[in-house]
Image (cartoon, rainbow, N blue to C red):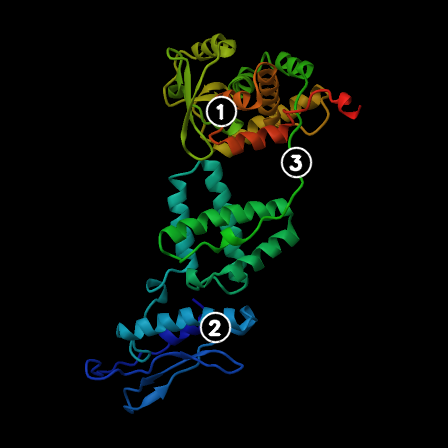
């Protein structure tokens, strides 16, 4: 809540015995219609018994909202709030109250949304939400929005913030911020903190697609050969390659997620849903041997840690970073030049699989089979992935120029 309104509700402490059951001791709060817009109302002074005009409530509305329609909408939310408080018996002369108990502040709303998201999304997704909310909150504080009702945060405010993100960072970060804040505001809308999620009506900025390169067959052979004495990193790479797991999914795997008897692996995806994949023959024996190397393993132990199977207190992102750095060092030692990361392993496998499928099947049937292997839940997601990888290329077409 802005400081002016807090002052209105807390600065007076005079007791009175006005009987509010006989007549209202206040006038209905209104918004001035002149060039200077503010909230005004009157309340009976308990000492004189006269209806007394209270201090105008400006809330920095003119500075925050140059557009008059936005300004009136902003002030209206506070006018309605003040009227509700007066109906409930509030007196500027008598009561000292914490306005936060009467409205859903920005801080409270964001904390609530994040607590819900934490229980329903993967750790990496939650951390992304938390980071974006933290930066947005810092900006709101700088612009004096930090204590206002969440309902006062509208599209105009959202656009102002996204503009600063774009100027200071990049179109890609602008879009990522838009996506994460939209997820938070969708939840707030569903929980009746706000009426609608205005972020969904804001368009993303077109960006140039950037992806990690894929490895050649010879490069993959060199990588595997160089990791013969680094079993954990090699197993992570093989699970990414042969099972098409993401690195974030592999570092979450526990011993209990592996069923050698049924040849199945179950893990949580980035949307926090459970996904089950088969253990293909090409990796089964190696995985079985790897697990049996740790006879004292517990079901709750992680499958991949720096020392193999065991406990690891680091979070998922830190685990990914650990192996990502080790992998980058390894590719540098092998003199593999270019934009590569652990994700390149999965991209390489996906490209190889889809190209092989297209040799025997039409596009639609190949896509269906690919989705079963990759774990994509939607055709759109699988198509986007294939398009990004350039896994679908045309056949020789020189004859079309004849």
In the picture as drawn, the residue positioned furthest to the front comes out as 402
Query: Which picture quadrant has residue 123?
Result: top left
Residue 65 position, x and y percent, is: 54, 69
Q: Are the residues at dot 1 and dot 2 in contact (C-beta closer than 8 Å)?
A: no
Check contact, mark 2 vs mark 3: CB within 8 A. no
- The percent coordinates of residue 278 (x first, y second) are 44, 16
As displayed, is residue 62 above or below residue 209?
below
What residue is rendered at 48% in x and 25% in y? 375
Q: Nearer the viewer, mark 1 or mark 2?
A: 2
Q: Which mark is residue 210?
A: 3
Q: For the residue carrying disc 2, how many other residues have a C-alpha within 10 Å: few (<14), some (14-19), or many (20+)?
A: many
Please give the name of the residue rendered at 68% of the width and 18% of the height, measured from the top-left corner.
Answer: 216
Q: Position of residue 238 (x, y in %)?
A: 54, 17
Among numbered discs 1 and 3, the one appearing first in the sequence: 3
The N terminus lies in quadrant: bottom left
Residue that numbered label 1 is attached to: 250
Q: In this orientation, which residue lies closer to the viewer: 289 or 186?
A: 186
């Amino acid at each position: 809540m802005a400081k002016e309104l807090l002052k209105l509700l807390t600065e007076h402490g005079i007791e009175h015995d006005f009987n509010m059951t006989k007549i209202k001791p206040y006038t209905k709060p209104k918004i001035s219609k002149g060039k200077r817009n503010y909230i005004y109302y009157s309340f009976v002074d308990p000492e004189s018994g006269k209806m007394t005009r209270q201090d105008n409530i400006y809330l920095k509305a003119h500075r925050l909202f140059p557009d008059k329609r936005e300004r009136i909408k902003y002030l209206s939310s506070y006018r309605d709030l003040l009227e509700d408080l007066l109906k409930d018996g509030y007196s500027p002369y008598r009561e000292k109250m914490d306005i936060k108990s009467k409205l859903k502040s920005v801080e409270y709303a964001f904390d609530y949304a994040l607590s819900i998201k934490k229980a329903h999304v993967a750790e990496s997704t939650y951390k992304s939400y938390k980071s974006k909310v933290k930066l947005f909150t810092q900006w709101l504080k700088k612009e004096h929005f930090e204590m206002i009702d969440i309902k006062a945060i509208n599209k105009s405010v959202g656009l102002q913030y996204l503009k600063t993100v774009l100027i200071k960072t990049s179109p890609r970060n602008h879009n990522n911020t838009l996506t994460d804040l939209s997820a938070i505001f969708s939840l707030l809308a569903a929980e009746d903190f706000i009426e609608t999620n205005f972020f969904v009506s804001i368009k993303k900025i077109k960006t140039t697609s950037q992806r990690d390169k894929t490895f050649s067959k010879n490069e993959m052979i060199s990588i595997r050969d160089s990791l013969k004495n680094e079993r954990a990193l090699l197993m992570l790479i093989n699970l990414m390659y042969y099972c098409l797991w993401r690195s974030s999914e592999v570092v979450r795997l526990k011993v209990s997620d592996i069923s050698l008897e049924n040849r199945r692996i179950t893990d949580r995806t980035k949307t926090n849903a459970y996904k089950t994949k088969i253990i293909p023959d090409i990796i089964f024996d190696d995985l079985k041997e790897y697990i049996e190397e740790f006879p004292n393993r517990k079901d709750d132990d992680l499958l991949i840690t720096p020392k193999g199977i065991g406990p690891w207190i680091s979070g998922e992102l830190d685990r990914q970073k650990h192996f990502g750095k080790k992998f980058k060092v390894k590719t540098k030692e092998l003199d593999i030049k270019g934009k590569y990361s652990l994700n390149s392993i999965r991209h390489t496998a996906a490209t190889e699989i889809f190209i092989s499928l297209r040799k025997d099947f039409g596009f639609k049937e190949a896509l269906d089979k690919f989705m079963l292997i990759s774990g994509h839940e939607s055709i759109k997601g699988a198509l986007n992935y294939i398009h990004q990888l350039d896994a679908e290329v045309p056949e020789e077409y020189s004859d079309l120029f004849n």
